[in-house]
Image: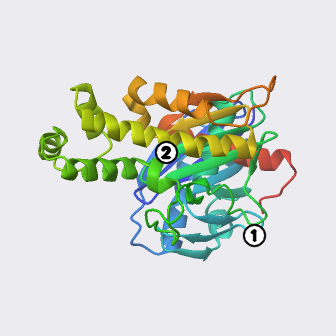
């Protein structure tokens, strides 16, 4: 059995674990990122965490085939760099070199959303499918595309930014500089904004009472209010699921994946989200007569997706003969 280490680099925590060749996570350790530090300090700790995971599992460095790293931002796997990450002090960070200074193993780097998609393809909701798309609904909208069992990320490894495709021309301002991006209408943050706007326009709605209880506008409030019979909340959820379905249908029309995986905390709301999301989405793609249809599934890998996906991305690179050195 071959083993790999996956590292999930986040703005708050760094998580790592040993993963076998079938995508099974064998152990997991984490440390605080402390993103105010220099990139050298952070990357040194990533290498040390990888070594700690190997020792924790009772293995030696020679038992590990490679280290895979999933990070927010734009990587350059060929050169072993993290070119840019908006939430971390990295600019052309020589991540491979600095990791290898701590632990001498091949190192591969990719975007965290791509790694999540790889995890779902290898061990999660899209297991067995050669072509899949994973979309995560969080503060923004993350997306990863798997084509023929491999991550697709464009010639510059900055592709699959589906959250920044325009859904509404001239719409809500996005942090990327454009207006009307998909993530401004389908993210959890977008749902919170829609809920706030609807509550302010309808002072008698129980959305306002729930806001006082919660202390903040979030993606849960509209669902709670809808379950209590609030018509304004029902309209918010209908609008949100319609925007979401438009974007998901665009992803299907673009890639025609066998499986479209949807994840993120908002999916925990269950049938009030999932039923209209599936029904609306599947009414929109261009499926000709007799054409096989994409399956829509919920993400299964949860908080382990980044570790498992990074490790499996490392495995994929090893299998493809990339040196990682």
Horizontal arrangement in the rendering, residue 53 relative to residue 238 (left or right): right
Q: Residue 27 at what x, y percent from top left? A: 53, 36
Q: Look at 76% across and 60% down and name the residue there.
A: 154
* Quadrant into which the C terminus falls: bottom right
Say if 304 sits above or below 77 in the image.
above
* Quadrant into which the N terminus falls: top right
How many discs mark residues in the rendered view? 2
Q: Residue 224 at what x, y percent from top left? A: 25, 32
Badge 2 vs badge 1, beta-carbon distance below 8 Å? no
Q: Residue 228 at what x, y percent from top left? A: 21, 26
Q: Nearer the viewer, residue 140 or 97?
A: 140
The secondary structure type at the circle numbered 1 is: loop
Q: Look at 47% across and 28% down and name the residue there.
A: 276
Read off the residue under disc 2.
243
Q: Which mark is residue 79?
A: 1
Label 2 vs 1, first from the N-terminus? 1
Q: CA distance from mark 2 to mark 1?
A: 38 Å
Q: Look at 64% across and 35% down and name the residue there.
A: 260
Res 102 quadrant in image: bottom right
Q: Residue 242 at what x, y percent from top left? A: 48, 40
Res 300 quadrant in image: top right
Res 241 quadrant in image: top left
């Amino acid at each position: 059995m071959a083993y790999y280490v996956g590292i999930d680099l986040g703005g708050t925590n760094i998580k790592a674990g040993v993963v076998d060749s079938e995508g099974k996570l064998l152990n997991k350790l984490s440390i605080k990122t402390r993103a105010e530090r220099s990139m050298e300090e952070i990357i040194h700790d990533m290498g040390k965490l990888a070594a700690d995971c190997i020792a924790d599992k009772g293995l030696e460095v020679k038992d590990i085939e490679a280290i895979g790293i999933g990070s927010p931002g734009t990587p350059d796997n060929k050169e072993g760099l993290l070119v840019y990450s908006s939430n971390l002090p990295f600019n052309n960070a020589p991540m491979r070199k600095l990791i290898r200074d701590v632990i001498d193993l091949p190192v591969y780097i990719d975007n965290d959303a791509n790694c999540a998609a790889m995890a779902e393809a290898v061990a999660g909701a899209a297991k067995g499918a050669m072509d899949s798309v994973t979309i995560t609904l969080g503060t923004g909208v993350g997306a990863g595309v798997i084509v023929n069992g491999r991550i697709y990320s464009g010639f510059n490894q900055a592709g699959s930014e589906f959250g920044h495709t325009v859904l509404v021309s001239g719409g809500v301002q996005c942090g990327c500089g454009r207006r009307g991006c998909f993530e401004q209408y389908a993210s959890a943050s977008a749902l919170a904004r829609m809920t706030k706007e609807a509550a302010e326009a309808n002072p008698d709605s129980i959305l306002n009472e729930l806001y006082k209880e919660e202390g903040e506008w979030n993606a849960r409030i509209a669902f709670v209010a809808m379950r209590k019979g609030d018509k304004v909340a029902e309209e918010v959820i209908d609008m949100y699921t319609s925007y979401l379905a438009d974007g998901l249908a665009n992803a299907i029309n673009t890639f025609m994946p066998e499986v479209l995986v949807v994840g993120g905390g908002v999916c925990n709301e269950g049938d009030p989200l999932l039923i209209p999301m599936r029904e609306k989405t599947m009414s929109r793609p261009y499926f000709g007569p007799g054409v096989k249809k994409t399956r829509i599934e919920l993400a299964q890998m949860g908080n382990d997706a980044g570790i498992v996906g990074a490790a499996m991305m490392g495995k994929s690179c090893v299998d493809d003969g990339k040196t990682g050195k």
